[in-house]
Amino acid sequence: MIPNLIGGEWLRPEADTLPVYDPATGEVIEQVPLSGTDAVTAAVAAADAAYKDWSRTPVMDRVRLMFSFKARLEAGFEDLARIVTRHHGKTLDEARGEVRRGVEVVDFACGAPTLLQGRTLRDVSGGVDQDLYRFPLGVVAGVPPFNFPVMIPLWMFPLAVVAGNTFVLKPSERTPLGAVRLAELFTEAGFPPGVLNLVHGAGPVVDALLTNPAVAAISFVGSAPVARHVYEVAAAQGKRVQALGGAKNHIVVMPDADLDAAVPAILGSAFGNAGERCLAGSVAVAVGDASGSLLEPLLARAAALKVGPGVEPGVDVGPLIRAEHRDRVAGYIERGAAEGAVVLLDGRSETSRAGFFLGPTVLDRVSDSMAVGRDEIFGPVLSVSHAATLEEAIGQANRMSLGNMAVIFTRSGKAARQFREQVDAGMIGVNVPVAQPFAFFPFSGWKGSFFGDLHVHGTDGIDFYTRKKMFISRW
Ligand code: NAD
C-alpha cells in the first residue's frame, strides 16, 4: 500500500485499498489507500501547524528551497516520466512533455521575489502613503485528476507554498504514484515537515477537505460535474476556489488551411495522450471545400498510427486508464453510429489485446445534436462535422456548454482574428494542435470548463494563493 505523507511522516492508514494498474498490461502494480476523514483531519492539522513558521520564513529562503526542488526534478526527470507512463499509460514522449510542462511552473515559482511584490503610492494625500502587501492564505488543498499525474499537482503546490501557504494534496486514486515521487523530491529538497502533505483516497477525502474549517482555499482539476460540486460546496463554506472542469474542443479547418501541417496537428490533438486530455481536439469542423480535401489524408494517417504500450519506441497511442473507461468510450462509438454518424475508422479492433487499449477512431457526419458531438468522450475518438461557413463552424463550437479550447487552421489572418474574437472559449489556437498556455500565463477555461475567478498558474495563480493587505500611514 502506498503511504500518506502527514507532517513529514510517511504513514499507511488502516483503510480499504484500490488497485493501481499498469494500463498497458492490465496488471495491478500497487494499492492505494482510501483514507478516511481521520487522515484528512491529521493532514490539515499538520499543514496548519506548519503554517505559522512557514508563512514567516523569508521569501528568499522559500525560493532557495524551490530551486533545490527544481534541481531534484531535473535530476529525476526521466524517472518521473517513466512513473507517469507506467501507471497512466501515455507514451514516454508524452510523459516527458507532461513533466517538462509541470517543471516550468516550478521555474515560474522561483520568480517569487518579483511575483510576490506589492505596490506603493507615496503621498496619496498630504503626508499619507499607501502600500499593498501580499500575504498567504493558510492551508490550501489540491485535488488533481488522473490524466496528468505529475503536471497538474505541479500546477498547484509549488506556487502555493512559495507564496507562504502550506498544502494538502489528494492525488487521483487512479494515478497516485507521480505525486508520491514529487513529495519525496520535495522532502529531500529540505522543505520543513507539514508544508506539503499527501492524503490518498477518493470522493470522501475531497468532501472532508471541502468542509474542513482550517482549509482556506481549494485548487481542483477534474470533470465538469465534480468541478461544479467542489465549487459549490467550498464556496458555500467561504473558501476560495478554482475548479477546472471538462472540455469539448473544436478544431476548425478552413478551405485555405495548409493540410500538410494541419492533418498531423489534428491527429496529435485528438489522439495524443489517447485523447485523455482536457485540451484534446474532439470535433474537427471542415469548412466549405475543406470537406472534400480533409478526410482522405486524415484517415490515411490515423489508420497508420501505432497503438501499443507507452514504453515501446514508435508507439503513437497508448492505452486508456481503465477497462471501464475504455468500454465507456467504445459505447460512444456505438451510440454515434446509432445516432447517424459514419464510422470511418473503428478503434474497437484494438480492444482484444491485453491492457486497456482502444485504437484511433474517426466518426464522420457528426452534429451537436448527437451525444458524440456534445459530450466529453475523453478517448481517442475524433468526430468530424461539416459547415458551409466560418460563422456556422463558430456557432457549432459556441453551442457547447464547455469552453476550454478551440483551434483554427487557416492561412487567413482575417479568419483567425474573427475566430479569436467570436469563439466562447478561453484558450484559442491558430495553426497549433493544442493551445496550452505556458506556466507564466493563466490556464484559462471558460463556461462549464471553469468555476471560479482566478485561474491556475501565471499571475492568476499568484493572486489566487495570496490575499492583499492595504497599509495607509501618516507619520
Ligand atoms: P474526476 O472528476 O473523476 O476526478 C477528479 C478528482 O476528483 C479526483 O481526484 C477524484 O478523486 C475526485 N472526485 C471524483 N469524484 C468525486 C466526487 N463525487 N466528489 C468529490 N471528489 C471527487 O476526473 P478524472 O476522470 O480524474 O479526470 C478527467 C477529467 O478531468 C476530464 O473531464 C478532463 O477534461 C478534466 N480535466 C480538466 C483539465 C482542465 O484544465 N480543465 C485538465 C485535466 C483534466
Image (cartoon, grey):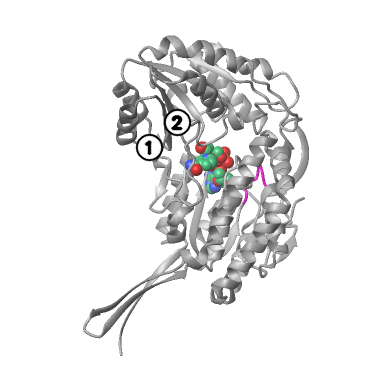
Q: Position of residue 72 (x, y in %)?
A: 70, 57
In the depicted structure, whether residue 370 falls above or below residue 156: above
- Residue at (61, 32) in percent of width and height: 273
Q: Can you identify the residue that label 1 sits on?
A: 425
Q: Position of residue 398 (x, y in %)?
A: 34, 30
Amino acid at circle 2: Asn
In the depicted structure, whether residue 9 falls above or below residue 447: below
Q: Position of residue 431 (x, y in %)?
A: 45, 29
Outermost residue to the left: 126
Q: Quadrant of residue 290?
A: top left
* Residue 172 appears in the figure: no
Foreground: 463 or 28? 463
Foreground: 159 or 242? 159
Q: Position of residue 51 (x, y in %)?
A: 57, 72
Q: How many marks?
A: 2
Quick one: label 2, few (<14), some, or many (20+) residues within 10 Å?
A: many
Quadrant position of the C terminus in the picture? bottom left
Q: Quadrant of residue 349?
A: top right
Foreground: 43 or 458? 458
Say which element carries label 2: strand
Task: Tell me the quadrant of ligand 1.
Answer: top right
Quick one: label 1, few (<14), some, or many (20+) residues within 10 Å?
A: many
Query: In the rendered structure, which segment of residues is drawn in magenta?
Result: 171-176
Amino acid at circle 1: Ala
Mark carried by residue 227: none
The first of marks 1 and 2 along the sequence is: 2
Q: Most prominent secondary structure in the magenta stretch?
A: loop
Q: Can you identify the residue that label 2 sits on?
A: 249
- Residue at (74, 33) in percent of width and height: 311
Label 1, label 2: how far apart the Cα atoms are: 9 Å
Question: Mark 1 touching mark 2, by CB under 8 A?
Answer: yes
Say which element carries label 1: loop
